[in-house]
Image (tube, rainbow, N blue to C red):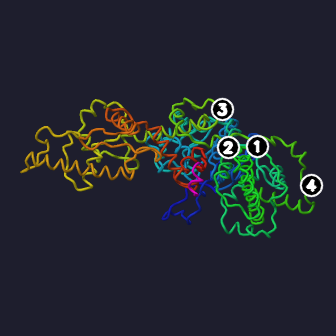
Amino acid sequence: MDSFDEPRPGDEAFDGFRMRLPENCVEYMLFPVGDKSLTSLEAIRRAAVKGADELTKDYIWQRQAFKLEMEIKDGLTYLYGTTNYGDNVEDEWLIVYLLRELSKSFPQLWIRVSDSDGEFLLIEAAKVLPKWLSPENDSNRVWIHEGKLRIVPLQTAAGVATSKSISLQDALAIIKSAPDSLIHSTFVEAEAFYRLEKYPGQITDFMHHSLVTLPRRAAYILHARPKAIAPATEAFYLRDPLTLKPFLSSSQPLSFPPRDLVTVSVRFTRVLYAQLKSQRFEPLPVWSSLIHSGELEVATGTSEAEKRLARLELGMKITTGLEILAGNAEKSDNRVAREVAFLLEDLEEDGDSTLPSDADIKTWKDVEREDDDLWMDIDYRDFEQQLDGAGSPNKDAPKGAGFGDANTQADLTKIVSRFEAFLNDEGAGIEGAEFDEMDEDDDSDNSEEDGASEDEDKEVGFDEEQFAKMMREMMGLPEEDTNQKGKQPAGESDRERDNVSGSEEDDEDEEIRKLMAQMESELNKHGALSLEQPSNPPPTILAKGGKNKGVSAAGQDEEKHIDDEEDGEAVDIDYNFAKNLLESFKSQAGMAGPAGNLLSLMGMSLPRDEGESDEDEA
């Protein structure tokens, strides 16, 4: 389905609404400008398919692979393709890489690529885009040519006005008549193609091998069709009670009964592995006894028993996915699913005697390979060092593990830097964050400090005085003298009220201090003012004008931290943001949510936190 700009209601050419590009789909169109011959198009298509096959022969696409077909529409002849990449955004960027490399081999080739969000290459480079380029006029302006990013300007050299959103035909007309008028910005290109820097190495680095215990039949299917792991994982991941109903009866015949188990290495993408690993699944009746036996063995406390149980649980999930896949193969439009059904039919006809023996399995490539999955682990203590590029403090950790992975570290650092730039953007308006009106009073009170740091970046800090002021307003209490900062007034108040004497104000202040102390005591009793982890005692917060009595070490550290902020030291926004982001992800409890979606855009698929699972179930 094309992304041509269709006429709007009221236009003469409007003939109804068309379906837009489905979610999680990328669309690409290839135009050989100046060469309309079908021979040229076919040569480009063959080169594209050949190059993709060579680069991705061992790659596993999440849902659909890269493909190209000839398209003729509205007088245009071109190559066209769409790919549904599902939850794996890495597939989308792999396609962009393939298209960019293809454009280097064919100087006459102009390529445009978009997805359900629109011009996602411009979205990636939003921080450095010129002001004139906006979502209202960016449609069909972004092109890939000779490995570079080109942008159709507002006005061409010929004086053609293009200030509004342009159609595909208009863009091609400009490319044909004035190709040199298209803009090539190295800054925009670097941001838009940032994720391509890790290719082609990322194609193999993104794969993960793990030992899995599963029925010999399932091992045979995965060996014959390695790419079947993707639809099998998705079938398991998107299961529902109705899908599992046929397999809940112990008398129901299964295509992959849990007998004659073997342990083999299975190849995943990191997304597929994380999807299986993070799912909590109650075993089907036929698997219950095996899983229960493994759990009893783990109770002995041996690490090998834990590994065997983990491999068995992973194999159970894969086998369940294959069962669902085979059961719905007739209604599926997935070619791999139908191939699995054909292999099963052959097994039914020929019998299990055709299955590979143990000796045959030992000859399989990488049959005992098991990659470390430390990249799924998160250690808050490593964040600051990783974001600073210092690497993991754990010297014994394998290279590329955890947040020591260079690609992951670069992605995380980039998103934090963008978030930091957003917070410090003084020009953010109605579509961003605008605090000018809210901060007018603060700016007037602190004009001297603002003047001293006029050329410096704004820091994110905690204004204890402003917080106390808001608390008093919410409770309906009278305002205090903010200039004294908690000290007992030595003389008459700067904010003098009419007909109120100094002694009355002192009495009133004393009452307020007593009330605040009582509130603090009550809140501390319930842990509401704790700034530490729940396992640590909450720090003591001083009452206004009070002394530090019996403050714990944690409380003293926190008090010092707040004092440092008041002295002008910057809050470590990198650490705080990354920590809060991951705590948000943890709160999703393995379900979909904003933090998980944000991380998935960076190609990061994090596991559900298993550390407290036992306590949670208890």
Q: Position of residue 235 (x, y in %)?
A: 70, 59
Q: Mark 2 highlights which residue?
A: 32
Residue situated in front as seen by the camera: 462 or 289? 289
Q: Mark 4 highlights which residue?
A: 354
- Assign a secondary structure to mark 3: loop
Cα distance, mark 3 to mark 4? 41 Å
- Assign a secondary structure to mark 2: strand
What is the crowding at mark 3: few (fewer than 14 residues within 10 Å), some, or many (at least 20)? few
Q: Position of residue 124 (x, y in %)?
A: 53, 43
Tell us which disc is closer to us: 1 or 3. 3
Residue situated in front as seen by the camera: 597 or 313? 313
Q: Mark 3 highlights which residue?
A: 399
Left or right relative to 261: residue 85: left
Q: Tell which circle, 2 or 3, labels the residue nearer the N-terminal end.
A: 2
Q: Mark 1 highlights which residue?
A: 58
Q: Is residue 612 magenta?
A: yes
Q: Residue at x 46, y 48 (%)?
A: 534
Magenta extent: 611-618
